[in-house]
Amino acid sequence: MGKICVVGLGYIGLPTATVFAGAGYDVVGVDINEEVIALLEKGQIMIEEVGLLEEVRKVVKSGKLRASLTPEEADVFIIAVPTPINHDQTANLDYVVAATSSILPYLQKGNIVVIESTIPPRTVEDVVAPIIKAFGVDPVQDIHLVHCPERVLPGRILHEMRSNPRIVGGYTKEASEKAADVYRRVVTGEVVETEATIAEMAKLMENTYRDVNIALANELVKISSKLHINAYEVIRLANKHPRVHLHSPGPGVGGHCLAVDPYFIVEKAPEEAKLISQAREVNSSMPSFVIEQIVRLTASLFRAKIAVLGLTYKENIDDVRESPSLQVIQLLQQYKEYDVYPHDPHVQQGKVNVPLYSLEEALTQADLVVVLVEHHEFEHIQGEQLLKSMNRPVVLDCKNCVKIADERIKVYRLGDAILQKGLD
């Protein structure tokens, strides 16, 4: 079936390599992190994702997936490296540039080069293609260059990589056709061929759409706070309209997609992308809004102990990239009168720069529990455990997920009108 070289073995690259290896391709996975390579050679991984470890072990054992610190000659090269954001909110393409440069010595005529990394519009045309051309390889005549963005949900990555529709945007029409045929061998969903720049923008707009809609819900919370209206009741009633679906508010937006991708559009068209930019401002302001609620709920206390539950950017995963929870903790730590005890059952100490505590340690003598992520473990937390451990049983549920009906425990949500009046 041919050989595939996947450059970047992170949250997208490793599942991608695994899926292609599982379909029968000979795959070499490349990463600059020696620990990632050493673990993969043993059939082990560093990330938490449903079903991934089992599939990795299977394809490594069969010899279909190998690990390497350097690229090798292949039929298809897939670049799946991060594109972080700079301090000025522009895309950092250093990893994409480095990964592209790393495969140049191994390119042969007829190779397919796929950029899966999320990138600003025109990156394939203005950045990647010129790098390849400067090396002496014609990106039109010699190889097939495309952008095929990932579109998966953490926790369901393997399933969605195989079942979700894929967009294959070619630098040329023939490149789209050639690369699309490769993806059709592993994807059961529709594989759509288009131009590279359109594929780049489509990916960004998918996440921008969600970011803007979340911002609308978060702005509603702020408005409701000022007017002493219950935002959750507003959302419940508005969503009874057959063509309305307001999202749920929360402490902010995280992850490498929603919290980053809109900026890639703003970067290219700052004067035109006003709504997108304002939505980013609203969502980025939510950690500070959470702090305002914490201050209100602890106004009568001296040196309150705050148990912060959840550090990841979404539920039931270990990914902390751009997590608003970490921003909340950082802001809390700036208040000298707070003792902050973070807890997350999915996150290991080495992944974050804040001390982690067990649930029991976090709850013991706590004056306030702040739930920032709707992990299953927090949805089912027991009222008796809070009553037994806490100094006073008060919860700020920023994700509307805590299911405690005990009247002895006060549970506040970000959108509750009563929260604006503080504790009774």
Image: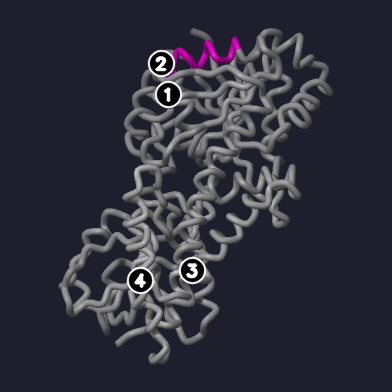
CA distance for labels 3 and 1: 43 Å
Left/right placement of residue 205 relative to residue 342 reads right
| Structural crowding at the residue carrying mark 4, measured as other residues with C-alpha within 10 Å and reported as few (<14), some (14–19) or many (≥20) | some
Name the N-terminal-most of marks 4 and 2: 2
Residue at disc 4, secondary structure? loop
Residue on which the image places disc 4: 416
Q: Are marks 3 and 2 in contact (CB under 8 Å)?
A: no
Q: Which amino acid does label 4 sit on?
A: Asp
Q: Is the magenta stretch mostly helix, strand or loop?
A: helix
Residue 21 in view: no
- Give the x, y percent position of residue 269: 74, 44
Q: What residue type is labelled 2?
A: Ala
Q: Which of 151 and 338 lies nearest the eye of the viewer?
A: 151
Q: What residue type is labelled 1?
A: Val
Residue 190 magenta-drawn? no
* Above or below, 330 relative to 379: below
**Residue 368: quadrant of the picture:** bottom left
Q: Residue at x 67, y 12 (%)?
A: 173
- Give the x, y percent position of residue 260: 59, 48
Residue on which the image places disc 2: 23
Q: Which of 222 and 158 lies nearest the eye of the viewer?
A: 222
Tell me the magenta residue range.
Answer: 177-187
Q: What residue type is labelled 3?
A: Lys
Q: Do the residues labelled 1 and 4 touch (CB within 8 Å)?
A: no
Mark whose residue sits in front, 3 or 2? 3
- Give the x, y percent position of residue 214: 48, 53
Name the N-terminal-most of marks 3 and 1: 1
Residue on which the image places disc 1: 19
The scheme the figure's colours follow is: one colour
Q: Which residue is drawn at 75% across and 16% down?
A: 139
Residue at disc 1, secondary structure? helix
| Structural crowding at the residue carrying mark 3, measured as other residues with C-alpha within 10 Å and reported as few (<14), some (14–19) or many (≥20) | some
